[in-house]
């Protein structure tokens, strides 16, 4: 009996210890962007936290309840983050992480639930106090080389980035890297054309929310928005490039439905705060099919598809339609280019090749050039 009571006591102690198991911070990733820095903490379970700022000197304090650090803070790169030093300490049951800053910032923290790529995450976004000023000057050099009224302005959107790698090929090729390479080549080609100018929605390996990509095109009064991707499909033999426009009706094919669903999950993977629910609802309610820009989007997409068909295989020989959120820019004609299925081993090798990337960029440029050749400067704007 005494032995039984002993083992029962041990069991209760073990159960009690398990019920108060500490949250673990198992990995930390830092993604610097021009106007902000994102710090992602991989955690193993929900946690209670508090974030606030202190002055003289400027610091961000992150207090985490019943949490232990199982990764090395000294191994975290702080290059171009605006953070001078990161340190931690423990008091009672609180793990305190202190970020010593180069300038004032506004912190925002939120939890992201697990998805197909990551487990549970605590995200800390550090936005510069001058963010709006920086956004107003976003890529100013590229945009303002030639007066805008005399030029067609193209917003080039490399999909994914940062915490969101996009689709991943059999050899480990990340979609975000491929499309950024193509986007940079396309930008250079367009900027060599008389009367045309281009800028990128992101200029590095960091994540931008889908709605922010649209805002950047609208804020610059872009005449055309081109989002570039290299997605995956469940059929690994799927091959060829595709061009899409937004439709509020049924997607034009199974692949179109699959790709739209995949791309629209990007904010769940890359991570955005849902505090601006009204803004999210507004973007979902936009319907380009009732706007004259739907016709302009389709016209531009047809020119790009025709040009791409002369240099590479096409998945389908017509413009497809699907409910891509990133195309819901009411006042900017928009299209999405799938440069190829990265899930196809042969296509993955092509997409990794710089000459093939150049070929894709060149064909998109020629399609855009043909579109603008046949279109007046007038653009329908709904405000």
Image (cartoon, rainbow, N blue to C red):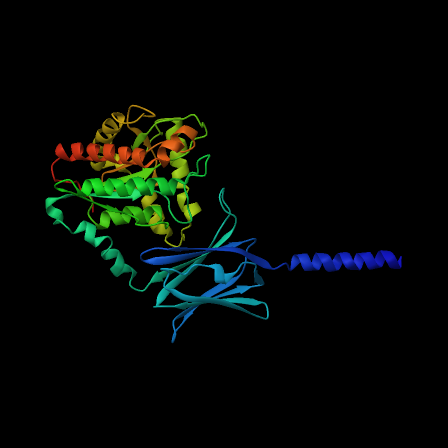
Using the image, determine if residue 189 lies above or below residue 271: above
Across and down, in percent, residue 59 comes to 41, 70
Across and down, in percent, residue 186 comes to 25, 40
Using the image, determine if residue 316 lies above or below residue 221: above
- Between 153 and 172, the residue placed more toward the observer is 172
Across and down, in percent, residue 229 comes to 34, 37
Residue 138 in view in this figure? yes
Quarter of the image with the N terminus in it: bottom right
Across and down, in percent, residue 106 comes to 37, 64
Residue 285 in view in this figure? no
Residue at x 28%, y 25% (from the top left corner): 318
Residue 341 left/right relative to 293: right
Residue at x 34%, y 25% (from the top left corner): 315
- Residue that lies at the very extreme toward the top in this rendered image: 317
Residue at x 21%, y 40% (from the top left corner): 189
- Between 299 and 87, the residue placed more toward the observer is 87
Q: Image quadrant of residue 347?
A: top left
Residue at x 33%, y 31% (from the top left corner): 249
- Between 339 and 271, the residue placed more toward the observer is 339
- Give the number of marks: 0
- Residue that lies at the very extreme toward the right in this rendered image: 1
Q: Image quadrant of residue 174?
A: top left
- Between 126 and 313, the residue placed more toward the observer is 313
């Amino acid at each position: 009996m005494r032995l039984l009571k002993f083992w029962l006591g041990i069991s209760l102690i073990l159960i009690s210890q398990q019920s108060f198991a500490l949250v673990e911070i198992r990995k930390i990733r830092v993604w610097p962007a021009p106007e902000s820095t994102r710090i992602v903490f991989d955690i193993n379970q929900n946690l209670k936290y508090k974030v606030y700022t202190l002055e003289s000197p400027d610091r961000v304090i992150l207090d985490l309840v019943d949490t232990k650090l199982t990764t090395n803070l000294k191994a975290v790169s702080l290059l171009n983050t605006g953070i001078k030093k990161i340190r931690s300490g423990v008091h009672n049951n609180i793990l305190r992480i202190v970020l010593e800053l180069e300038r004032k910032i506004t912190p925002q923290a939120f939890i992201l639930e697990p998805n197909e790529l990551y487990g549970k995450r605590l995200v800390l976004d550090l936005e510069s106090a001058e963010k709006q000023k920086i956004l107003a000057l976003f890529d100013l050099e590229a945009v303002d080389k030639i007066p805008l009224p005399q030029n067609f302005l193209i917003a080039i959107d490399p999909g994914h980035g940062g915490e969101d790698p996009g689709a991943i090929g059999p050899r480990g090729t990340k979609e975000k890297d491929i499309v950024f390479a193509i986007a940079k080549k396309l930008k250079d080609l367009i900027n060599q054309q008389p009367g045309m100018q281009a800028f990128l929605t992101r200029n590095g390996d960091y994540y931008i929310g889908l709605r922010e990509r649209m805002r950047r095109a609208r804020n610059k009064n872009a005449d055309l928005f081109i989002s570039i991707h290299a997605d995956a499909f469940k059929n690994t033999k799927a091959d060829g490039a595709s061009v899409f426009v937004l439709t509020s009706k049924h997607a034009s094919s199974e692949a179109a439905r699959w790709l739209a669903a995949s791309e629209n999950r990007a904010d769940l993977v890359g991570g955005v705060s849902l505090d601006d629910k009204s803004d999210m609802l507004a973007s979902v309610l936009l319907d380009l099919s009732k706007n004259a820009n739907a016709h302009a989007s389709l016209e531009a997409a047809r020119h790009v598809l025709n040009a791409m068909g002369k240099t590479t295989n096409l998945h389908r020989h017509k413009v497809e339609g699907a409910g891509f959120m990133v195309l819901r820019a009411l006042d900017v004609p928009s299209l999405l280019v799938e440069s190829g299925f990265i899930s196809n081993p042969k296509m993955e090798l092509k997409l990794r090749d710089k000459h093939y990337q150049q070929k894709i960029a060149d064909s998109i440029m020629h399609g855009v050039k043909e579109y603008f050749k046949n279109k007046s400067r007038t653009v329908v704007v709904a405000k």
